[in-house]
Image (cartoon, rainbow, N blue to C red):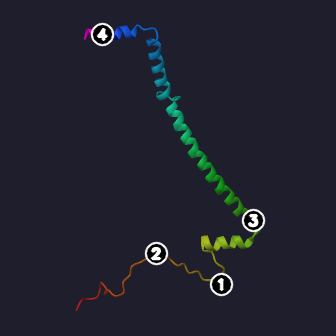
């Protein structure tokens, strides 16, 4: 045990050992600990990329909506089309039939539940 202790003390008293240890600890602290670490910086870069993607998506939606607003302001037929399709509005002399896309499994071959089996 004393050989290991003597070797450690000999190594510790070398002129560059304390500086090297201080540099290694400093690099570890800067790299992984704290809010200004390299790790936090990489996370922030990833989040910035996600936010830029969201901005591009919202800009596309904004352009599409602006063109639709311009179309509605200039073309009364477009307003009528939206009113009929989205809000099921109709003229006084019209009837509206809403067809459902639901897939209902009604089997007409089965007897009624109220009917008695013979």
Marks 2 & 3, CB-CB < 8 Å contact: no
* Image height of 10 relative to 110, above or below: above
Residue 26: x and y in percent read: 48, 20
Q: Is residue 4 magenta?
A: yes
Chief secondary structure of the magenta portion: helix
Viewed as shown, does residue 81 lie left or right of 109? right
Viewed as shown, does residue 14 lie left or right of 6? right
Front of the two marks 2 and 3: 2
User: Which residue is tagged 1?
Assistant: 93
Q: Is residue 11 magenta?
A: no
User: Which residue is tagged 4?
Assistant: 5
Q: Residue furthest left?
A: 118
User: Which residue is tagged 3?
Assistant: 73
Distance in Å between CA atoms under marks 2 and 3: 35 Å
Write down the quadrant of residue 82 in the picture.
Answer: bottom right
User: Which quarter shows the C terminus?
Assistant: bottom left
Distance in Å between CA atoms under marks 4 and 1: 103 Å
Secondary structure at numbered mark 3: helix
Of the image marks 4 and 2, the number of the one nearer the N terminus: 4
* Image height of 50 relative to 9, above or below: below
User: Which residue is tagged 2?
Assistant: 102
* Image height of 117 relative to 23, above or below: below
Magenta residues span: 1-6
Front of the two marks 3 and 1: 3
Marks 1 & 2, CB-CB < 8 Å contact: no
């Amino acid at each position: 045990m004393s050989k290991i202790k003597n070797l450690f003390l000999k190594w510790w008293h070398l002129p560059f050992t304390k500086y090297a240890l201080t540099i290694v600890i400093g690099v570890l602290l800067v790299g992984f600990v704290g809010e200004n670490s390299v790790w936090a910086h990489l996370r922030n870069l990833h989040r910035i990329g996600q936010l830029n993607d969201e901005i591009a998506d919202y800009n596309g939606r904004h352009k599409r909506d602006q063109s639709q607003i311009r179309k509605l302001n200039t073309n009364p037929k477009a307003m009528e089309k939206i009113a009929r399709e989205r809000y099921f509005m109709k003229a006084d002399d019209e009837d509206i039939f809403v067809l459902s896309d639901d897939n209902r499994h009604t089997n007409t071959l089965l007897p009624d539940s109220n009917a008695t089996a013979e």
